[in-house]
Every structure is written in C-alpha cells, then in structure tokens.
C-alpha cells in the first residue's frame, strides 16, 4: 500500500507522549515535540516523566528501534512530519471557567511557517467547540499559502492507568474533517490501529463528521461520565438519609443494560486533570454560544461532586464525636491516616485530587494528618508541602484515631485489617471509595463507614 505518513506529536505531556510512544509501537516513524527542554531530554533518554503502566518499556524499545525521537525544534518537526497531532495542554483559565488556548496557538504558529509541503494538522487536545475553525484561520495566516495545509479534529479518550490500551485499541475513532484528502490521510495515519484490530478480529467503529461535532464528542462524553458519577453520589446522600446501601442500589440499577454498571461507584467523587475542568469549560463555552441554560445541570453535577468530598469531614465529625462548631468540627489532638493521594489508583496524578482536598480540609480542622500513597507521594508533596507523609501504609496508620481510605489502590483494598488493627489507636475507618470488604474489616473489630452505606 501507500507509504506510511510520518507523524509528529506537538506537546509531550501525558497525552502527546503516550500517543507518540504508542504510534511508534504501531510501526510509524514518530517525532515528539515540546518546548520543555528537560522533558524532551528525559524522554530521549528513555524515561517517561509520569507514571503509566507499561509505557517505559515501549519508549525504550521504540527509541532503540529508531522509530521514535524527541526534539524541541519546530523547524525539524515541520520538515519531518506529514501529519502533526496537536496534543498540548488546554488548562483552566485563571478566571476559573473557560479553557486557555495559548499553548495551542503557540504550537500552531511555531510549526506552520516552517512547512515546506502539504501537511495535515490534527487536533487532539480537549478544546472549546469552534477551536478547529480558529486553528484553520491561524494556519491560513501563518502557513505558506501555496501548500494547502489542512486541519482535522480527532479527539482522544485516554484514561490514565489504561492509556496504552485506549490508544492501541480505541473503542471508537472520531474524524472531524472537511475534505476527502484529510479523511484519507487520517485513515492512513491510523492504519496501524486498524491492522491491529483486524489481526485481533475486532472492529474499530469510525465516525466521520464535521469539526464542531468532533470537538463536542469529547466534552459531551466527559460531561456524561461526570454526570453519572454525581448521579450515584447524589443517590449515596439519599441512601445515607434513608439508611439504604448505595453499592447495592448501583449494582441493581446497573443490571439494566440501558443504564450499565460502569461509572456508578459512589464515594468522594471525581477529580483529575480532565473531568472537573472539562465540565466547567463546557459550561463557559455553552454560555458564550447562548446555550448556557442547556448545561445548567452541570453546575449541579459540580456541586454534588464538591459535596461528596465534604462528606468525609462530616462523617469524621460523627465518628470522632467532634461536633460542628461555627468553624466546623475541631479535630485537634487527633491523628488521621489518609490512604491515597492520587485522584485514582494506578496513577501518580494528584491534579484536583479528592483525596488531597480532603486531607487539606481535615488538617484545616486541626487534625494531625499522615498521608501515604503507593505512587503519588512526590506529586502530593509538591502540591501540599506542609503535610506529613508516611513512607509506608503501616507507618501512616500507626497511632491513628481514624483511617480514611480515599484512593482505591489494591494495596489498601487487600490490606490485612487484623495487622492494621494492631497499629492504630482506634479501629475506625472511613471507606471513601466503598472499596473495602466490610464484613472482613468488621470481623477484625473495625467500625467501617462507607459513603451511602450504613456503618458496620
Ligand atoms: C477521564 C475519562 O474517563 C477519559 O475518557 C477522558 O479522556 C479523560 O478523563 P481519567 O481522568 O483518566 O479519564 O479518569 P477516570 O477513570 O475517568 O476517573 C475520573 C475520576 O472519577 C476519578 O477521580 C475516579 O476516582 C472517579 N470515579 C470514576 C468515581 O468516583 N466513580 C466511578 O464510578 C468512576
């Protein structure tokens, strides 16, 4: 068939690095591009600057095979690539709402003036709807006009901790395109993905659509997931009030295939670099478009999520018999072990982590906090330097008046409640993720309190 296009990934953060490495693994010649010199050196030396299972090996293998390189030089990127994927960050703006597109703008304007042949720019970053059109204007202003450089949009759906699978075996491919050429180029650029699926007797559904729809697919998917989590957390509040058990409720409604059993785990709610910021940016964009009313429910989704974090302080106040005063409960003189810092297990990411937000809040109410996380310690220390961090799970719980499980790491779920019971001052545990085997812990003499479940 036709020779494979050469690919660049602009921005080698979590998204771009993962894609660059996986597409090299699929056999493409790949160049990762970033303005961050230390990050590029690190990657080129074979070290992934974040935690993602399996990625280190793939990185080293593909550098060794000569299929993967990294650079800070946009001129080199322009010469190298046929298809350029925009993977830079789109952080929350300082005003707290919309997405900041400065990195997108600088990636495009750094690249396109140096292009010497026709190329395709493909947006992957999560952006406000309308960004692809705006990039097209940037391209027509800054790229050599005679080349006919084109733009396309193909959102990603990576879940941290599961990212390799999500890139190599995507459950769908969305192609926002304006021309047959762009369509064909994108298909060729994903041939490795289709070949792998074919070898494994799978289908990869492809949706070919316009720019605006492709951009919206990503934020709509994240808004739906966030809503599903807040829905079950709202049910957890009702279960607490009614003396019901939200885990059994979730299981029961989940058997209905129209509802499904995924993303119905009640607890302290969602965090991370995507869901919280994406639902806020989506609301801001809808507002700008005059459709703000349609997304007003997302404000409520956000509020339920914030409230879920606050539930741990409330429950701690009940369990520790430290009632609310005007400034909330007073936990002074008490030791609380916080198990978990990452926003979810199998990740070292602490961005907008419910676990850390709760740790901060417990400390603000006077508790002496001891935090342990299997992977997230370094990032947590950077984010919350004033906290006490324990080197092991055992150290964290030693002398604790209360243990809070806030990230459902296997190390916590399968910890031995008998052994931990010997270390603590009181056998009280708040299961912020409803991930513990309540019967087992209770048999070991613990009082276990989940969110949306009666105490045992
Ligand atoms: C998410 C989307 O899943 C992914 O498709 C998108 O590309 C980026 O955002 P990610 O942020 O990696 O991925 O994590 P995810 O596994 O979706 O979890 C998000 C948060 O929701 C975590 O804090 C998790 O603990 C929480 N969560 C998830 C729940 O509280 N309950 C659930 O049932 C599921």
Image (spheres, rainbow, N blue to C red):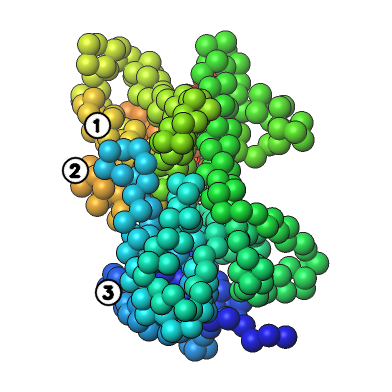
Q: Relative to 184, is 433 on the left or the right?
A: left
Q: Relative to 250, is 363 on the left or the right?
A: left
For numbered disc 3, what is the local secondary structure?
Answer: helix
Residue linked to disc 1? 363
3D distance between C-alphas at marks 3 and 1: 37 Å
10 Å crowding of disc 2: few (<14), some (14-19), many (20+): few
| Residue drawn 60% across the image and 16% down it | 244
Where's the C terminus, which quadrant? top right
Single out the mark in the foreground, 3 or 2: 3
Residue linked to disc 3? 37
**Residue 175, percent from left and from top:** 62, 59
Residue linked to disc 2? 386
3D distance between C-alphas at marks 1 and 2: 10 Å
**Residue 281, percent from left and from top:** 41, 40
10 Å crowding of disc 3: few (<14), some (14-19), many (20+): some
| Whether residue 414 can be seen here | no
For numbered disc 2, what is the local secondary structure?
Answer: loop
3D distance between C-alphas at marks 3 and 2: 30 Å
**Residue at the front extreme?**
146
| Residue drawn 35% across the image and 38% down it | 97
Q: Are marks 3 and 2 in contact (CB under 8 Å)?
A: no
Q: Relative to 401, is 289 on the left or the right?
A: right
């Amino acid at each position: 068939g036709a020779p494979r296009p050469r690919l660049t990934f602009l921005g080698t953060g979590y998204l771009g690095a993962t894609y660059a490495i996986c597409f090299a693994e699929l056999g493409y010649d790949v160049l990762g591009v970033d303005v961050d010199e230390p990050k590029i050196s690190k990657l080129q030396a074979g070290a992934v600057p974040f935690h993602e299972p399996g990625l280190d090996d793939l990185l080293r293998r593909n550098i060794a095979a000569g299929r993967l390189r990294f650079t800070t030089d946009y001129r080199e990127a322009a010469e190298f690539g046929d298809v350029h994927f925009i993977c830079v960050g789109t952080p929350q703006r300082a005003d707290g709402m919309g997405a900041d597109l400065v990195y997108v703008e600088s990636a495009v304007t750094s690249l396109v003036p140096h292009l010497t042949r026709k190329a395709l720019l493909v947006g992957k970053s999560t952006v406000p709807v309308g960004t692809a059109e705006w990039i097209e204007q940037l391209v027509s202003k800054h790229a050599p006009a005679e080349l006919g450089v084109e733009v396309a949009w193909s959102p990603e759906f990576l879940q941290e901790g599961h990212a390799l699978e999500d890139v190599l075996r995507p459950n769908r491919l969305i192609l926002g395109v304006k021309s047959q050429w762009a369509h064909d180029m994108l298909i060729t650029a994903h041939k490795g993905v289709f070949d792998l699926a074919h070898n494994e007797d799978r289908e990869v559904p492809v949706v070919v659509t316009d720019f605006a729809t492709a951009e919206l697919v990503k934020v709509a998917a994240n808004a739906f997931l966030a809503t599903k989590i807040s829905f079950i957390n709202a049910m957890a509040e009702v279960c607490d009030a009614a003396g019901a058990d939200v885990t059994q409720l979730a299981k029961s409604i989940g058997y209905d295939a129209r509802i499904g059993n995924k993303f119905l785990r009640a607890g302290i709610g969602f965090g991370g670099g995507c869901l919280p910021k994406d639902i806020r940016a989506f609301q801001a964009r809808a507002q700008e478009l005059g459709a703000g009313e349609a997304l007003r429910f997302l404000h409520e989704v956000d509020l339920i999520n914030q409230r879920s974090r606050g539930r741990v302080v409330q429950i701690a106040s009940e369990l520790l018999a430290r009632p609310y005063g005007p400034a909330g409960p007073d936990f002074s003189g008490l030791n609380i072990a916080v198990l978990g810092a990452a926003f979810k297990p199998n990740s070292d990411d602490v961005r907008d982590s419910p676990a850390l937000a709760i740790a901060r809040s417990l400390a603000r109410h006077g508790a002496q906090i001891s935090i342990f996380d299997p992977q997230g310690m370094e990032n947590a220390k950077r984010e919350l330097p004033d906290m006490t961090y324990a080197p092991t799970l055992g150290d964290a719980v030693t002398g604790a008046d209360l243990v809070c499980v806030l990230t459902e790491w296997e190390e916590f779920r399968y910890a031995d409640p008998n052994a931990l019971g010997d270390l603590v001052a009181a056998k009280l545990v708040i299961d912020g993720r409803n991930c513990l085997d309540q019967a087992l812990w209770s048999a070991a003499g613990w009082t276990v309190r989940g969110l949306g479940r009666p105490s045992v």
